[in-house]
Image (tube, grey):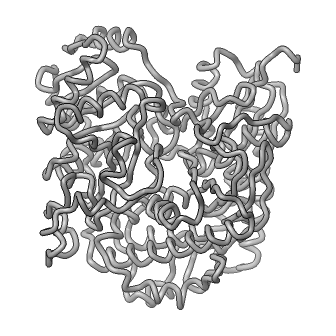
Amino acid sequence: MSENMPVYILGISAYYHDSAAALLRDGEIIAAAQEERFTRKKHDAAFPKKAMAFCLKEAGITLKDVAFVAFYEKPFAKFERLLLTYLNYAPVGLLSFLKAMPAWLKEKIFLKDILWSELEGFDGDILFPEHHESHAASAFFPSPFNEAAILTLDGVGEWTTTSLGVGEGHTIKLLEEIRFPHSIGLLYSAFTYYCGFRVNSGEYKLMGLAPYGEGKYADIIRRELIDIKADGSFRLNMKYFNYCVGLTMTNGHFHRLFGRGPRKPETALSQFDMDMAKSIQEVTEEIMLKTARHVREVTGKKYLCLAGGVALNCVGNGKIANAGIFDKIWIQPAAGDAGGALGAALVAWHQYLGKPRAVNGKDDLQKGSYLGPGYSSDEVKAFLQAKGVPFEAFDGDQVHARIAELIAAEKVVGYVQGRMEFGPRALGARSIIGDARSTKMQEEMNVRIKFRESFRPFAPSMLVDRAQEYVQLPYESPYMLMVGPVQESQINPESRTTTLTGLARLKIKRSTVPAITHVDYSARVQTVSPERNGFYYKTIEAFRQKTGCPVIINTSFNIRGEPIVCTLEDAYRCFMCTNMDYLVLENCVLDKTQQPNKDQYKKDQISQVLD
């Protein structure tokens, strides 16, 4: 490497779920994206060819210019864990073993050869950090802190399922770990499976369902399924689980313990399912809180950085924040395996090459997580003109006043501006937005726009300097990864006296912003600042000026079963096949009633999504 040439490092995660690519230039995050956004295959696990191509294009380079490729885990160590697990349980699990073996041999043992075949033109070095090292790096290195405790929690990497450590300057060090098969992530996934949702994608549904239930089974979980120590460490009773060697998460012992088999997907949810969701959520929060207190005691650090799939449990994150265990916490927006691509690249830059960090204690280095593709106003106009569809273009800030007017009239607006978000949360770049004051908007957007379960909550985006008027959180939540209680001053007192239970509670007006107030009087918050979210901030500020309310609904721009939209074509197609009223592409506004062929779009696309 020439001293005068920039050093490019490409991070890759793949072959499990949510594959992604991320690119650094001299340690600066240039681009990052999940493969699913380009292939339109939700949770795509394939090698991220399209995401990698985007990252290279964004930097204006080819693979020949890349010095290092960093893969997010050690494949042979993972194969070792899989093989030893099956040997320990043999002959139980033979069917699962035979089914998994071809993929193991191809993707785990010979993965380095596969990577070389996918990296045509690359002649640098390939590095393999450990899975939880990649998670820890993704948590600490982009954070605003020079020193912090680190906590990673997920299903499993090679062997580790939970780790704690410390970050100082440009180094991270993992101090303690919990190893497979004992995993809070896999425990939560077992209940996801048991309640009829898809593992590795339905966990957030389980979290959203929990407030409709009561924690009736939490004590049974603690007594039979998991032994939780005072420091948050734990051991699972493997008698009840099938994930080590089987093709399911739970087994007959689990089902007899709770008196029922797993709910069949798409069947009606019962109060039992809601109570199970609430029970495992309570246990998860207990572990997260105890572990956070232990990390503070062990490291002595006043800040905490979080990553791993369990760090997407924003209810647990909010409990940690409001408990005051740390002065502040920072959570990697792409906390799951996709973020491992970014973490692996950062390990290469800071740990392998020993390069320093420059932080100020206030601003993180994640750039709002707006790290994907974006489009200029000229590109938008050219796209719309080529399609021959009607639209209205606005000059300057006039577009924000128009959007505010539409939202205030209870219109549902698809919203595309700037670069696409990296991570599972829509943050105002690829969002569907609406009026948080509306009593009909939650059901309207769930059923008629998103084609999904009516119980699913919506998150608010709110002006950062007005957020604490509405939600109890000790500091900003820019990446929509913390839940806090809605302030009592915003609560409708009459809603506290209801006798309704289960999903019937949806019909109650719970607060001044009912569309984003969950049935337990909480909200998953995105705080929006002019520095981090300039265009989006102006839209919400225009709505505040018109209505006095600094809060709007923000949900991801997609429909059930599809990834968040990436391209202009993705956005237009999604807009046309749903009951969205308007579409905003940068400074251009499209009215659904004026669009040609709208009936054909609905017929073709809705049937495809619901099949």
Quadrant assignment, res 388: top left
Q: Residue at x 78, y 24 (%)?
A: 7
Question: Does 74 sit left or right of 277 as displayed?
Answer: right
Residue depicted at 57% across the width and 54% down the height:
328
x, y percentage for residue 153?
A: 62, 62
Classify 189 as above or below 549.
Answer: below
Residue 65 visible from this viewpoint: yes
Q: Quadrant of residue 377?
A: top left
Task: Give the left or right position of residue 459, taking residue 257 as reference.
Answer: left
The reply to whether residue 107 is in sight is no
Q: Quadrant of the N terminus?
A: top right
Identity of the residue drawn at 42% across and 59% down = 204
Q: Is residue 477 above or below residue 557?
A: below
Q: In this picture, is 354 found above or below 205?
A: above
Q: Nearer the viewer, residue 522 or 54?
A: 522
In the displayed structure, 50 sits above or below 80; it is above
Residue 90 in percent (x, y) is at 72, 79
The answer to which quarter of the image holds residue 122 is top right
In-image side of 4 versus 28 (left or right): right
> Seen in the image, is 405 located left or right of residue 372?
left
Residue 463, percent from left and from top: 35, 40
Of residues 308 and 400, the one nearer the viewer is 400
